[in-house]
Amino acid sequence: MPDTFTYSTLWYAIAAVIVIFILPSIRIIGPTEVGLVMKRLGFKKLSEDNPIAFHGEAGFQSDLLMPGLRFKFWLLYKVGKFPWVQIPAGEIGVVIAQAGSALPIGAKSAIFKPEFGNFSNLREFIEAGGQKGVQRPVLPPGTLVPIHPVAFLVITKREVYGLPVSPELQGLAPGATKLAPEAFGLRPEQLELVRIQPRPSGPEGKTIDMVGIVTTYEGDPLPSGDIAGRLGGFADVDKMGKSDTSDAEIIETLLGSKNDLHNNYQDYQKFLDNGGKIGLQHDPLLYGAYAINPFLVSVEMVPMLVVEQGQVAVIKAYVGLVTQDTSGPDFKFGSLVQPGHRGIWQEPLRTGKYPINPRCYQAEIVPTAILTLNWANVVSQAHNLDQRLEQIEAKSREGFVFKIDLQVQIHVPDTKAPRVISSVGTMANLVNEVLQAAVGNHFRDNLQNMPAVTFIETRQKVQQEAFAHISGQLSEYQVETKGVYIQDVVFPADLVVVLTQREIANQEIQTFEKQRAAQEQRISMEQAKGTADMQGQLAQSKVNVDIETNNANARIAAANGEATYIRETGKAKGAEVEAVGLARAKAFQAQVQALGQNPTALVNAVTVLAEKQAKFVPEILVMGGAGGSGSIDGLAATLMKYLGGSGGGAAAPFADMPLDTAAQTDSAGSAIADMMQDSKQVATDAARSQATEPAPQPDEAPKQAE
């Protein structure tokens, strides 16, 4: 019985020891966990400024328990589990060391050495001289590393890894509450990668190119007089300026970046090793994503300088070498300098995109195309330089106040742009100060001595005078004037009424003149129309005139010919008669001498009667009868002989006569009875006439024979 009790008691005691001392001392560390060991008892004392034991002192031990089964006697050691530090994509982890040497006075971040690695080896960090405080490099995206939770705090966007030892930080996270980035003065977005990329702007979604302006918070102070740091200063630019290097090459060097020396501020230790200074940096960041420590570097996004076609950018440099004027003694408006010096660069930037720091260089965009400015209620959408320009108010001699819409076109040559900006400061000053005064004063001074009507009538002349005046004013600033145009004139209502009435009267006069001219034109048209309508008759009449003229000429010619014929014929016949008469006379004389006078006359008379076929016996014998009708009967017989024909003395039968002759015979026969009475009287008168006519003399016989 005692033996049984003894063995049972022993086993119970062993089990109790295992349960009480061994099992609690076995630690299971997960695959993504570390075990932080804290020693409860120790004979050595920790240093005053170090919360971690490296040589068996009581407190947090430097060595971590890695994943797996681990044994730590629970009465002597306390083990806490902490996750590995994991940095999500697109984020960074800022490391703050709670162990190590103290920072030098004035230092804001701890020195970094390559031996530190990713801060997973605490002993090596301490032995290599690691310092407390913000570590200069950050943990990049995708990092998964077991880091000592007491030696280092790792701040990420969502949580803070590690166990803070500062009472102030512990007070910010009582109990199980985790610390947030705000506890360290950081915003969650600062723990993301810094992205430099184009940004849309405006309702149309226009893309704007961006650059990152860098400001650093750790490093030696800037030299006296400098406002921005540039690695190596401007010694290289000074060397180029003393040689024959062109301004364009110097500008390329200034715009070139030295960010490759420190991996775009991501390796801050190299930045400091290469002479980086605290404060504003000369070289901006270009497109990309950068893991930058927000405690040491801040990045401001600003638009990139873009110089469009038809523009130049005049650079006002606030950094660089000491100002050395290159404008010459004749230029009285400020100074011009070679690129790399402080002042207005003598060489402008032309069309292109330039990643310059607007905190170091101010670019004044100068339009080199024709610039149109409107003194009106409209604003040019191309430049908006005339947004403050208003209609010009002028007063005439009579006191009429009217407004003028004016348009002025100017041109700034690109080679003269630096001198223009040196003279006026900005293009807005050129428009609002210089040009506004020149234009407004000219119109007010000239028009107040001019009647309103004269201004209206001589508007072109006023415009030309304004062009000459403005050209002279702007030429002093080396600006060309391309045109001055009076667009519109707004007159007072009273003047408009007077001018309207006058214009109506003038228009009526012109209307009446037009109507008169129209009537005159109508008369001319009607005349032309009548002439056109009578062209046929006129042509016919002209032809008739020509015909009649020709006929008259023909008749004249015929008459002349007939007269000539008759005259010549008469002459010939006269000569013939004379010749015949002389011959007959000679013959008659010979006959007289041979026969005697009377016989000769008788022979010749008979000869003539025979030649003429004279009838000695009448064809119709009329004899007197009772009642005295013998003459009428003779007339009737004579008429019937004429109607019947002359052949044989007998009347032709009606059947053999032509139709026309028969008709005539019928009508003549019907008229015989009417003519009988008259014929009697005619016959009686003829008989009386023959009875009273004297007989021909003997000497006339030859003539009758002829």
Image (cartoon, rainbow, N blue to C red):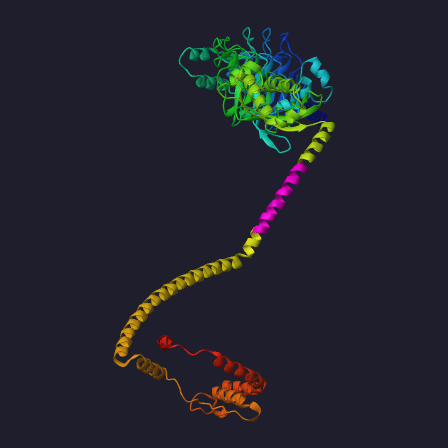
Image quadrant of residue 606? bottom left
Residue closer to the observer: 545 or 311: 545
- Does residue 28 belong to the magenta stretch? no
Image quadrant of residue 598? bottom left
The reply, left or right, for residue 556 in relation to residue 319 is left
Asked whether the viewer can see residue 330, the reply is yes
Residue depicted at 29% across the width and 76% down the height: 588
Residue closer to the observer: 670 or 98: 670
The reply, left or right, for residue 87 in relation to residue 167 is left
The percent position of residue 24, horizontal first and vertical second, equals 67, 23
Q: Quadrant of the C terminus?
A: bottom left
Q: Quadrant of the N terminus?
A: top right
Answer above or below: position of 609 versus 425.
below
The percent position of residue 239, horizontal first and vertical second, equals 43, 11
The percent position of residue 264, horizontal first and vertical second, equals 52, 20
Q: In terms of secondary structure, what is the magenta stretch mainly?
A: helix
Q: Which stretch appears magenta?
A: 507-527
Residue closer to the observer: 545 or 115: 545
The reply, left or right, for residue 274 in relation to residue 557 is right
Residue depicted at 58% across the width and 7% down the height: 104
The reply, left or right, for residue 304 in relation to residue 607 is right
- Does residue 509 belong to the magenta stretch? yes
The percent position of residue 9, horizontal first and vertical second, equals 71, 25
Asked whether the viewer can see residue 120, the reply is no
